[in-house]
Image: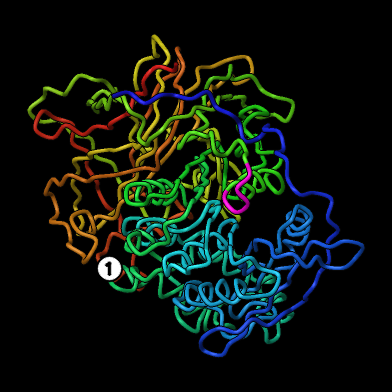
Amino acid sequence: MKPRLIAAVLLVSCAVPARSQGYDVVLAERNLMIPTRDGKRMATDVYRPARNGVAVSEKLPVLLQRTPYDKTTARTQAEYLARHGYVVAVQDIRGRYKSDGNFLKVQPLDATDGYDVIEWLATQPYSNGSIGMWGTSFAAHMEAGAAQLHPPALKTAVINMGGMSNAWDHGVRYRGAYEMGRQLTWAWSQLAADAPNPSVRKLLLEQEKVETWYDRQPMRRGLNPLSVAPLYEGWYIDFFEHADYDAFWKEPMMNWSEHYVQTSDIPMLQIGGWYDIFLAGTFQNYAGLAKIKKSPQRLLVGPWVHHGDTLSYAGDVSYGADAAITDFDGDFHLRWFDHYLKGLSTPVEKDAAVKLFVMGTGDGHKDSAGRLFHGGYWRSANEWPLAGTTNVPYYFHANGSLAREKPTEKSSSTTFTFDPRHPVPTIGGGASARLKDGAYDQREGVRFPPSQVPYLPLRSRADIVVFQTEPLTEDMEVIGPIHLVLHASSNRTDTDFTAKLIDVYPPSDAWPGGFDLNITDAIIRGRYRATRDHAVMLQPGKVYPFSIDPFPTANVFKKGHRIRVDISSSNFPRFDVNPNTGEPLGRNRRMITADNTIHHSAAYPSHIVLPLAPARR
C-alpha cells in the first residue's frame, strides 16, 4: 500500500500555539552541583519561570541540556524556554568547566551521569516529574546515552545532529578509515577548555597550527602538541589505532544501534542534515527505534551542515529561504515540548513521521552571495525509505559512461595509481570542524588543502576515475539510501576505495565551466571489506566486491544535468590516508603507491544503485 503523502506543514513557519507565556525568568541556581552515583558533582545552571522576580511555586516540566561547550553559552535559549513555562537546567558534563571528574571524548560515565541527573531533577520541588532533553551534536550524544539507560522521568527528546548510532561506522571511524581531520581539529579547538594551565595550552595550539599536522599522521605518543594533555592525546590515538569493531565500540556513548531495545520508549525527534557528519546515524536511529517503539518517532532532515539548521545554504550552494528553520532556538522546540510534556495541541501532532528537504529544483543562477542556487522543497511521508521507491542500478562502463545497461565485455577494467603522499583533497561533504563541509564545485583551491597549483577540477586528476551519464532527458528525483557495488583489485595487501555522487551542472553564463556539485560520498578500507570484527588483508590481484554505502540523500537531478560517480582511494584530511603497506593502523612509518583496478565487465558489473522516488502527490 502506498503511503499517504501529507503536504508539509513546515516547522519553520507554523503559528505559535496557545501556551503559558509572559513569565519573567530568574537564574535560580548558578553552578548547582548535582550529585552522581560515584560522588562526582555536575555543575548546573537552573533557570526558572518567575513573577516579579520570584520563581513561581507551581510544579513544571524540566528541560535538560548537558554540554561540554560551557553551559553559559546556552543562556539565551534557556531563558526563552523558561519564559514559556519550563524549568530549564543546563549542565557542564563531567570534567568540563565547573563539573567534577575527568573529561574523555566518549566515556560510559556520561550515560550514567545523565540518568542520575534526570532522576535527581525529577524529585525537586519545582519539578512535576517529567523531564525533556534537547541539544545539538555532543549534547545530542548525551541525550542518546541517557535514554539508553531508560531513566523513568525522561519523557521526550529532541536529538539534533547527534546520537551516534555506531561510531565505528561513521563519526569517529568510517568503515575502517579514521575520520582524522575532524577528530584532530576538535581536539585542537577544545583542549584549552580543560585546566590546568589553559592559557599555556592555548598559546601552544595557536603556535602549532592544526593544518600543519595533517600530514604528520599518524602522530606518536608523547611526540605531538596533544601530548601536553595525555587524556586528549590518549583518546585521539586510541581511536586511530583501535580499528577492529569490538566491545570498545559497542558501549552506549559510542553505539546506540547496539542498545535500541533497552532505550526509553518516548517520543523522539531525530534531526539531521544532508551534509552533517552524523547523518547516517540520524536515519539509523530513527528507523531502528520506529521499528520497535510504540511512542511517536519523527525524522526531519534539511540541506544543512553540522549545526546548520538555521541556514539556507551549505558551503557554496544555496537552497532558498524555506530551507532554514528560522525559529530553531525558540518556538521550534516549544511546539514539540508543549505537545509532549504539557499535552497542548500544536502542529507537531499532525506532522508526518518523515519530513525531508529535497534539493535540486533551482535554476542554478548565482545568488547575491555568489552561491549556486540549487533550490529545493519540503516533502513529507509516513516511512523511510519512501514507499514506492524504485531502486535502479547504473553500471560503470569502460568508456567512462554510467548507464542502466549492464556491461557485456568479458574483460574490462580501469587501473589508476594511488599515491598516499599526494591524496585527493577533501572538498565538502560531511566533514565538519575546520574543514569546509557542505556543497562545493569539485575543484581544487586554496580553501581545500592539500590542493596544489594549478587549481583544476578533481575530474582532471589521474587518480580519480569518472563515470557519468549522458545529459538527462528528464528530471530524476533520487531520495533514499545510496549503495555501490565496486568490483576492484589492488597490487597491495591493503588500500582504500572512495565513491562520490555528483550532480553535474552544464556550463552557463553564471558558471562557464559548469558546476560539479557533490551530493554524498563514502570510503571503505580494504582490510575491512568482508568483516568489521577483524582485518582480512587483500590478496594482490584478486578481485573483490566492495560494498560502499554513502549517506542517504534527496536530490533532483534536473533535465540537462549529468549524474556522475567518482571513484578514487583518498579523501584527505577528512579521512586518514591509507599507506598501502598493510602495517597496523595508526602505527605505520612507510607509504607506498598502489595500483588499484576497477572492474566493469559482464562478470564484474560495478554499479551504483539509485533510489528513484515515486511522484509527488
Magenta span main SS: helix
Q: Position of residue 615 (x, y in %)?
A: 40, 17
Closest to the observer, 359 or 283? 283
Residue found at x 60% / y 54% = 341
Question: Is residue 102 visible in this depiction of the protein?
Answer: yes
Residue found at x 87% / y 61% = 51
Circle 1: element type:
loop
Residue found at x 50% / y 17% = 506
Q: Which residues are magenta?
A: 340-344
| In this picture, residue 172 sits left or right of residue 313 | left
Q: Quadrant of the N terminus?
A: top left
Q: Quadrant of residue 373?
A: top right
In the rendered image, residue 343 lying in the magenta stretch gets the answer yes
Vertical comparison of 585 with 561: above or below: below
Q: Position of residue 457 (x, y in %)?
A: 49, 33
Closest to the observer, 341 or 108? 341
Q: Position of residue 182 (x, y in %)?
A: 52, 59
Q: Local crowd at mark 1 within 10 Å, few (<14), some, or many (≥20)?
A: some
Vertical comparison of 401 with 153: above or below: above
Vertical comparison of 250 with 402: above or below: below
Q: Position of residue 520 (x, y in %)?
A: 43, 38
Vertical comparison of 159 with 485: above or below: below
| In this picture, residue 462 sits left or right of residue 441 | left
Q: Amino acid at mark 1?
A: Asp
- Find disc 1 in the rendering and name its residue: 244
Closest to the observer, 452 or 447? 447
Q: Quadrant of residue 188?
A: bottom right
